[in-house]
Image: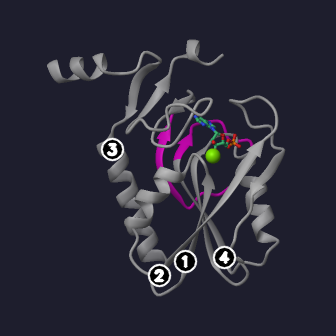
Amino acid sequence: MQLEHMRHESLPADITKVLFSEQQIKEAVQRIGSQITRDYSGQKLLLITVLKGAFIFMADLVRAIEGHVEIDFMAVSSYGAEAKSSGIVRIIKDLNTSVEGRHVLIVEDILDSGLTLKYLIKNLKSRGPLSIEVATLLFKEGKQQTNVQCRYIGLTCPDEFVVGYGLDYAEAYRNLPYIGVLAPSACV
Ligand code: IMP
Ligand code: MG
């Protein structure tokens, strides 16, 4: 009781609650890492991280995978409102690596409408990979507007705006070690 009280006292003012603790995130990442290790056993895997939100997830996930793993980064941005995906995606930073003939795993922070991933998968598929799958840390319930298939899902979260562990609001809060709910009053 007292611990809970203390923890809440130390939350930043704009965070209404901790949705997933460091420990819960760690367990989810370990679980996904083990699945990936098993599924890609004996194969070379290329992890593609979608910047910036997935950078912490990627850093932890890559250490939870055993075997031959290479990494590369992409940065994309959606036009339109900050907290909502428009489906029109712009590549800000492309890969340095060719994905042709590779087993590709896209590492995402959160699947909300799915529009960003839908675009990314289509784009990467046109480059001729051997296979392409998705690992997302968070899956927002009931929000998907597309039929994007995520082979690996860390945690399912309610339809609230979440921040921390790499996820931002207006570039802030990425450094929180847990995932928390942002107060609606903080989203302007
Ligand atoms: P989607 O295209 O609607 O699936 O949204 C994709 C991107 O929007 C994610 O990769 C995040 O960068 C961002 N996003 C969606 N929901 C949240 C959230 O609750 N917190 C922080 N970023 C989010
Ligand atoms: Mg993202």
Disc nearer the start of the sequence (2/3): 3
Determine contact: label 1, label 2, CB under 8 Å: yes
Quadrant of the image occupied by residue 79 = top right
Q: Tell me the crowding category of disc 1: few under 14, some 14 to 19, or many 20 or more residues within 10 angstroms, Cα based.
A: many
Q: CA distance from mark 1 to mark 3?
A: 26 Å
Kindly identify the residue that appears in the image at 46 percent across and 87 percent down.
42
Q: Which residues are magenta?
A: 138-157
Above or below residue 108? Residue 78 is above
Does the closest atom of ligand 2 sit within 8 Å of the Cβ of label 1?
no
Residue receiving disc 4:
131
Give x and y (percent) for residue 46: 58, 74
Quadrant of the image occupied by residue 106 = bottom right
Q: Which mark is residue 45?
A: 1
Disc 4 element: strand
Between tags 2 and 3, which lies in front? 2
Disc nearer the start of the sequence (1/3): 3
Given the image, on which type of amino acid does mark 1 rest?
Leu
Of residues 97 and 187, which is closer to you in this image? 97
Residue receiving disc 2:
68
Between tags 1 and 4, which lies in front? 1
Above or below residue 153? Residue 165 is above
Q: CA distance from mark 4 to mark 3?
A: 30 Å
Q: CA distance from mark 1 to mark 2?
A: 6 Å
Determine contact: label 4, label 3, CB under 8 Å: no
Given the image, on which type of amino acid does mark 2 rest?
His
Q: In this image, 44 relative to 22: left or right?
A: right
Disc nearer the start of the sequence (4/3): 3
Residue receiving disc 3:
24
Give x and y (percent) for residue 134: 60, 61
